[in-house]
Amino acid sequence: MAPVVLILKVLPKLVVEEAEQPPSINGDETPNGTAEPSEPEEKQCPAPEEPSAEASVPKVDQAPAPDPKETPPPEVVATPAMAVPAAPRSSYEFVRDWKLLRTHGELRSQYLRQIPPGDYASIFKQALEESTLVEILRVAETLPAAEIGSHLRGLSQVQRVDVLVMFMSSQDRKLLQGLVSRCEEDGQDMSDVKKRVGV
């Protein structure tokens, strides 16, 4: 019976102590015992990183410089030598060939030397022009004196050659006179040529 009595004496004291203790206030409860809504925690987002200057500039892959030792030399294309046209049979052929050789003085000289001087009259007839005659005289100036005389005699047989000489410039007339004098100094008789061309 003694233990039962002891329990009955202690039990009322425990009940009284529990009743006197104030209720604990939690973070989520008010003193009245009502729960207050907790404020949601704000999550801090990390600030975006600013791109660096190096990242904003696109990288360009630079091709390696070519090695001069590996660069092949340019191909050299050989230009075929121009052949001298055959002797003309008409003024058309002469003018065509003469224009073709206008930048080749040596080839013009060879072309002129293969024309028989006696054929000038039949080649040109009345189609010889003053500019063509002057060009022939300039090329004939590069020939030996004996050949110059032959070409002057052949040209003097062309029709209207005296009219062409008349319309020459003073410089071109001096050229013709110089060729005639050169032939005379070589011992050639140029009286007939001088009479026909009027120098």
Image (cartoon, rainbow, N blue to C red):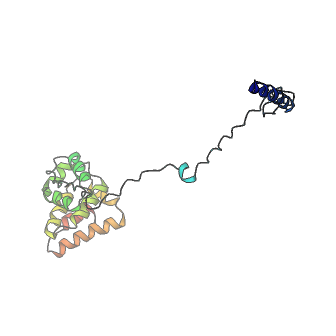
Please indicate whether residue 45 sits to the left or right of residue 184 in the image.
right
- x, y percent for residue 139: 23, 63
Give the left or right position of residue 88, taking residue 11 as reference: left
Quarter of the figure that contains the N terminus = top right
Q: Residue furthest front?
A: 1
Residue 72, given in percent of the width and then of the height, sits at 24, 57
* Quadrant placement of the C terminus: bottom left
Residue 186: x %, y % from top left: 15, 74
Whether residue 159 can be seen here: no
Question: 159 and 52: which one is in front?
Answer: 52
Q: Going by the picture, which residue comes out furthest to the bottom?
A: 185
172 vs 34, nearest the viewer: 34
- Residue at screen point 68% across, 40% down: 44
Q: Is residue 4 above or below residue 62?
A: above
Relative to the observer, which residue lies in front, 14 or 168? Answer: 14
Point 16% across, 60% down: residue = 110
* Camera sees residue 166: yes
Q: Position of residue 182 (x, y in %)?
A: 20, 73
Number of numbered tags placed on the structure image: 0
As rendered, which of 137 and 59 lies closer to the eye? 59
Note whether 104 is above or below 1 in the view shown.
Answer: below
